[in-house]
Amino acid sequence: MVPRNTAAPADAGVPRHAGVSRALGDAVERPRPLAQKNTAALRGLATRSGSGKYPGTTSRPGGTMPKETVTITDHRTGKSYELPITDGTIRATDLRQIKVDDQDFGLMTYDPGFMNTSSCRSAITYIDGDKGVLRYRGYPVDQLAENATYLEVAYLLINGELPTQSELDEFTHNITHHTFVHENVRTFIDGFRYDAHPMGMLVATVGALSTFYPEAKHVMDHEIRRTQMIRLIAKMPTLAAWSYRHSMGMPFVYPSNELSYTENFLYMMKRIAEPKFEVHPEIVRALDVLFILHADHEQNCSTNVMRGVGSSRADPYVAVAAAAAALYGPLHGGANEAVLRMLREIGSVNNVPAFIKEVKSGVGGRLMGFGHRVYKNYDPRARVIKRLADQVFDIVGKKSPLLGVALELERIALSDDYFVSRKLYPNVDFYSGLIYEALRIPVDMFPVLFAIPRTSGWLAQWEELLLDKEQKIARPRQIYTGYGERKLVPMSERKRSSITAEAVKSSPSETD
Ligand code: ACO
């Protein structure tokens, strides 16, 4: 990758900045549209489609394979650089050699929100957002939802393979025997205000577990790491249920070893004084399926936080607390809560057209539960959840009055050009809230119900990060836009700043 000193063509049409063109060697590659290239890059592991060995290319009889490189010509200096392409991706650090002079830091990429940046290699979850495909370790999520339990899926995510019966029995036994928390956690939860949001309590208590297991900081020790992973998956339902009980002003219910993972959670949340607490098995199964659908979703906002915190080798309790905090936001896992509030606000089918009009004009905020950074097609999880919602409504014996509002919103949005042209489809959160509502779970608990199953995904991603030799502490670069060096002004000479007023004026609305 030594720069080749090729003179830039004196083409008046070429802008005077770094340009990109593919190095084709002596072979000619059919140009692919940019969007198609980007999709291949996002896929990372580049499924080898077509007859050629290289993604997006075909071998020609008697011809030479195109070189998997890209040539960048820096028109500021006239130098060209040949960079390798691996899995449809170039390494951002390869750009650093592109400099105007020795003092230059080198070319960087600017990618707010990681719109086109792979931050890791991962073998856990595969998404094809254009086709609406979601697979955990190669298994389509709808097949897992149909045939597996949440604990099987958690095992799969963490270990890479589905368990045999004896492996599952051992895993289930370990999880079941780690569901209790230290009694001090109980007093800790008791200390929250009566109206504390359960998600705030969950974030705080799961982070506090770090202080109960100081050995957890030895994150590179396999045995220690695995013990904490079991503890976290096991204790999340207990913390979640207790946060709920506290917000309801009800006594805490201790875990029951006789019950399955999901049933035990419902038991700790809902038991009052029944001699024998029973939940309809179909309801337990419905919640288990929801857990499966929420278990992982590759490099989303909270997983990125989990990996970011994990990259400093912090213990998994504080990393899960940080990831759960990211999940809490209304643009991520807090969206299911926001969807239900939105449906209640709309109130009736008659108000839907006016609401859609407001969304489109930009004054009414977003249509919550619609749109996704990756899915530009129907979210495959939303499809399963919509079916599940009908089953749950049949069992509880009544449909939510908000279902009509949701169906009408979906009908209009799927035919309205604003949503169609932006490829905004219902996401996982659009219908899940209606199921939780039918189960008489308050909206505040919705993001908590997301955090419980996502813990296995976070932990699988966290361990993958720790074992990946290419990973380093997460530390992005910035483009500095502030002042150059200034002389400090004494207090007596300072003037009132207009910055605050400017910031208020330019702040985006809540869900922008
Ligand atoms: N309602 C109305 N318009 C929308 C919506 C929506 N839900 N989502 C995106 N848009 C519009 C944007 O205004 C923008 O329009 P423009 O091109 O005219 O400016 C365009 O679609 C693209 O939107 P972006 O914000 O650039 O898309 P991005 O990929 O950054 O955002 C996100 C994805 C955050 C999920 C977004 O679609 C959204 O806010 N949805 C509502 C919240 C939600 O349901 N979140 C849950 C996601 S699933 C999960 O996290 C588990």
Image (spheres, grey):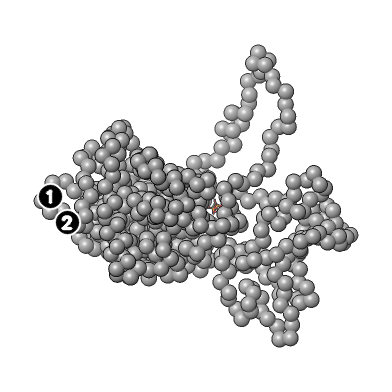
Residue drawn at x 27%, y 62% is 285
Q: Is residue 427 above or below residue 135?
A: above
In the picture, measured across the screen, residue 280 lies left or right of residue 436, that is: left
Q: Quadrant of residue 89?
A: bottom right
Which label sits on residue 367? none
Viewer-nearest residue: 506 or 484: 484
Viewer-nearest residue: 123 or 395: 123
Give how far across and how far down residue 6 sits, in percent. 86, 62
Residue drawn at x 56%, y 37% is 507
Give how far across and how far down residue 103 sits, in percent. 80, 44
In which quadrant is the N terminus drawn?
Answer: bottom right
Can residue 407 be seen in this snapshot? no
Q: Are marks 2 and 1 in contact (CB under 8 Å)?
A: yes
Q: Please name the amino acid that badge 2 sits on.
A: Glu
Q: Please name the amino acid that badge 1 sits on.
A: Glu
In the rendered image, which residue does mark 2 sit on?
278
